[in-house]
Image (cartoon, rainbow, N blue to C red):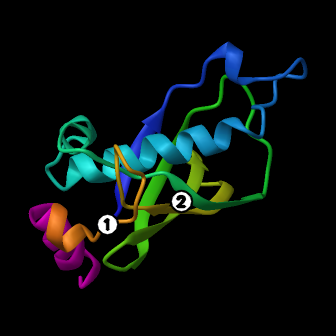
Amino acid sequence: MISRLDIQLRYSDSDQMGVIYHANYFSFYEQGRTKYLKDLGFEYSDVEKDGIIFPIREVSGKFIKSITYGEQIYLLTTVHKLTKVKLTYFHEIFNTDGELKASGYTTVVCVDKETFKVIKMDERMPKIYKSYVKDSQK
């Protein structure tokens, strides 16, 4: 599955030159991960209520062309790699003219919210894990 998120840029996302500040791309990637889970039929807030969180393990980004304030952009997110304890997502940001602006990867680890110990998704959230597995086999 490819999850699409249309991003509404705010003036506060840009620097004095009207260019979107580089750290905001990682916030866009976070929004993409949440949207991907929602597209699978699950809410991240429900996952947290079940005592599970997904802290970032690794993040990378390639900035290809600056995004400027006022541009219309969207983010595509896919699962790049899945194990029982972590997920790696691939993200691409495009403008409405189809220009690739940036790409990157984020890896999250499944942990218990109280203890921060790594847990297996197939044991603690089997429905969601099965949805990820099913989706990644397409």
Magenta part of the protein: which range? 125-138
Secondary element under disc 2, as helix, strand or loop, is strand
Q: Is residue 137 magenta?
A: yes
Residue lying at the far bottom in this picture: please name it: 137
Residue on which disc 1 sits: 119
Residue on which disc 2 sits: 91
Residue lying at the far right in this picture: please name it: 17
In the figure, is residue 105 to the left or right of 20? left
Q: Is residue 127 above or below residue 6?
A: below
Residue lying at the far front in this picture: please name it: 115
- Which image quarter is the C terminus in? bottom left
Mark before the other along the chain sequence, 2 or 1: 2
- Label 2 with label 1: CB-CB less than 8 Å: no
Tell me residue 15's x, y (percent): 84, 22
Identity, as a three-letter code, of the amino acid under mark 2: His
Q: Dot 1 surroundings within 10 Å: few (below 14), some, or many (20 or more)?
A: some
- Which image quarter is the N terminus in? bottom left
Query: Is most of the magenta stretch helix, strand or loop?
Result: helix
Q: Nearer the viewer, residue 69 or 23?
A: 23
